[in-house]
């Protein structure tokens, strides 16, 4: 089974994308809804939580791990790879790969949680491939609660998006990375506010492409994965609001199963 984890329910955008490309693969999802958000926590805490999330999915039978959460990917990937002997795919590298692939574009904006932007991981990875690229990060901490409130199309949300994107617009970026699980749900507003000439990279799409590619290149891993098209959703806290967001993301009612960490 493919284990996918996130700090909460936002990582279902990754499940949605993976399901779209690999509908037959069995997926185990864990959303750490009791301890969300991770984006405001210290490095030590995010690493500890990510280890516990991974352990839970492995105990439940995951044979590979997909870190949907940008914050956990930015901060905890190295520790997870050292600690667990299963393939681990994170969300940063696939988005970076897309960003560096167009030689005509060289000014990148990255939006995400404070922890992700402050980690500088997108900039380091982009510059390792194309040092001439300019990378500008902008933390957008209010966007996660707005999405969780279901304010996807409200005027207030548009105004806040516009305000957050203003500094990136004035830097004349030509690529914008959506470096947070929740932002794909605001993609239309973000594209409208940043302008249609800017290429917007949805990190959940990029990650699901990389999962597909990884399985194609690693038939030994692929052949061991179950393919009955099932999806199980575990969370550390169940509320009506989480159920609602899950439905908005997956466009179907899902049963969230409570687990204690
Ligand atoms: N899942 C987190 C991320 O992608 C956003 C929510 C949080 O701060 O935990 O960075």
Image (cartoon, rainbow, N blue to C red):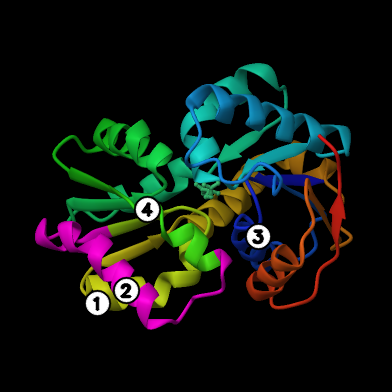
Evaluate whether residue 173 shows in this view. Answer: no
Q: Which mark is residue 196?
A: 1
**N-terminal of the two: label 4 or label 1?**
4
Mark number displayed over residue 75: none
Give percent across and percent down for residue 88: 63, 34
Span shown in magenta = 148-175
User: Do the residues under discs 1 and 2 have CB atoms within 8 angstroms?
Assistant: yes
Q: Position of residue 32 (x, y in %)?
A: 70, 44
The residue at the point 88 percent across, 39 percent down is: 60
Q: Position of residue 174 (x, y in %)?
A: 19, 61
Choose between 245 and 225: the one closer to the eye.
Answer: 245
Q: Which residue is mark 2?
A: 191
The residue pinned by badge 4 equals 98
The yes-or-no answer for disc 4 within 8 Å of ligand 1 is no
Q: CA distance from mark 2 to mark 3?
A: 21 Å
Disc 4 versus disc 2: distance between alpha carbons?
Answer: 17 Å
Which quadrant of the structure image shows residue 85? top right
Seen in the picture, residue 236 relative to 84 is either above or below; the reply is below
Check residue 35 for magenta coloring: no
The residue that disc 3 covers is 12
Mark 4 vs mark 3, CA separation in Å:
21 Å
Q: Nearer the viewer, mark 4 or mark 3?
A: 3
Local secondary structure at mark 4:
helix
Residue 164 lies in quadrant: bottom left
């Amino acid at each position: 089974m493919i284990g996918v984890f996130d700090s909460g329910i936002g990582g279902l955008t990754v499940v949605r994308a993976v399901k779209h490309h690999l509908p037959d693969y069995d997926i185990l999802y864990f959303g750490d809804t009791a301890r969300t958000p991770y984006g405001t926590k210290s490095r030590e805490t995010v690493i500890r939580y990510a280890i516990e999330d991974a352990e839970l999915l492995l105990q439940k039978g995951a044979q590979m791990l997909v870190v949907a959460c940008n914050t956990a990917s930015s901060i905890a990937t190295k520790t997870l790879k050292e600690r667990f002997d299963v393939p681990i795919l994170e969300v940063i590298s696939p988005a970076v790969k897309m960003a560096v692939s167009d030689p005509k574009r060289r000014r990148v904006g990255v939006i995400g949680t404070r922890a992700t932007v402050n980690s500088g991981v997108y900039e380091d990875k982009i510059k390792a491939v194309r040092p001439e690229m300019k990378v500008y990060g902008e933390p957008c901490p209010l966007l996660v609660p707005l999405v969780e409130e279901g304010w996807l199309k409200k005027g207030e949300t548009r105004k806040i998006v516009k305000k957050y994107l203003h500094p990136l617009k004035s830097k004349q970026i030509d690529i914008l990375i959506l470096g947070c699980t929740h932002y794909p749900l605001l993609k239309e507003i973000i594209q409208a506010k940043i302008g249609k000439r800017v290429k917007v990279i949805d990190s959940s799409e990029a990650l699901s492409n990389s999962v597909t590619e990884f399985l194609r290149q690693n038939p030994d891993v692929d052949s061991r994965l179950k393919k009955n098209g099932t999806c199980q959703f575990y969370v550390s806290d169940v509320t009506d609001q989480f159920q609602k967001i899950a439905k908005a993301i997956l466009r179907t009612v899902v049963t969230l199963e409570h687990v204690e960490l």
